[in-house]
Image (cartoon, rainbow, N blue to C red):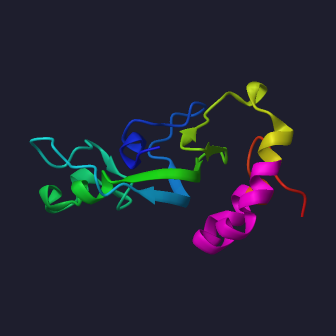
Amino acid sequence: MKYRLMDVLACPYDKTFPLKLIVIKRTEHPERQYTWPRKPFCEEYCSYRDLKIKEHPKPETLPCEECHRWEIETGVMYCPACGRWYPIIEEIPRMLPDELRNEKEEVEFLKSIKAELEKVAPDLAKKILYEGKPFRLKE
C-alpha cells in the first residue's frame, strides 16, 4: 500500500479521517521517480509525515518524491473514534465490514505483529491489541 492512499481513506463505520497509520514493514523502491508536476501530491493529509497539509506552512516542501518510493507491506490502520483497526497484509489494506472479517485470521495477524507493534507504536499497541474492534487478543 502506498502512503498516499491514506489521503482518501476514512473509517467505513464513522467516517473518521484521517485514520492513524502504523507501519510495521515497508520496502523502498528507489527506481520510482516522482513525475507529477505539482507538490504535494496528496490534498488533505500526508501520512508519510502524519500531518494535515493545510496546516503545514510550506506544503510544497513536503517530501513527496521520498514518500513515493515506499510500499507498506505490513501495518495497521486505526480509527481513534470507534477503536476499529484494519490490517495491511502483503501490501493490501483490508477494510471489510465486521461481519465479513475472519476472526481466526485477524487474531493470528495480531499475534504475528504484537512485538513490532509494541515497539513502533507503544501508545496505540494496547488499544489495538487488547481493546480493538472487532477482534482483539486476550491478555
Please check the rendered image and state whether residue 36 is part of the magenta-colored stretch, yes or no: no
Secondary structure mostly seen in the magenta stretch? helix
Please check the rendered image and state whether residue 125 is part of the magenta-colored stretch, yes or no: yes
> Which quadrant would the C terminus be assigned to in this image?
bottom right
Which residue appears farthest toward the front when viewing the image?
Answer: 31
Which residue appears farthest toward the left when viewing the image?
Answer: 37
Considering only vertical position in the picture, is 68 above or below 8?
A: below
Q: Is residue 49 visible?
A: yes
Q: Is residue 80 visible?
A: no
Q: Is residue 35 left or right of residue 68?
A: left
Q: Is residue 40 left or right of residue 79?
A: left
Considering only vertical position in the picture, is 41 above or below 61?
A: above
Instruction: State the extent of the magenta-drawn residues as a range.
Output: 108-128
Q: Is residue 91 left or right of residue 52?
A: right
Q: Is residue 32 left or right of residue 58?
A: right
**Total tally of numbered discs in the picture:** 0
Q: Determine the residue positioned at 42% across, 44% down.
A: 6
Given residues 32 and 112, the one toward you in this image is 32
The image quadrant that residue 121 belongs to is: bottom right
Q: Where's residue 133, x and y in %? A: 74, 44
Q: Where's residue 119, x and y in %? A: 64, 74
The image quadrant that residue 125 belongs to is: bottom right
Considering only vertical position in the picture, is 110 above or below 133?
A: below
Q: Determine the residue positioned at 24% across, 54% down.
A: 64
Q: Determine the residue positioned at 71% across, 60% down.
A: 113
Q: Where's residue 60, x and y in %? A: 13, 56
The image quadrant that residue 137 belongs to is: bottom right
Given residues 16 and 93, the one toward you in this image is 93
Considering only vertical position in the picture, is 96 above or below 55?
A: above
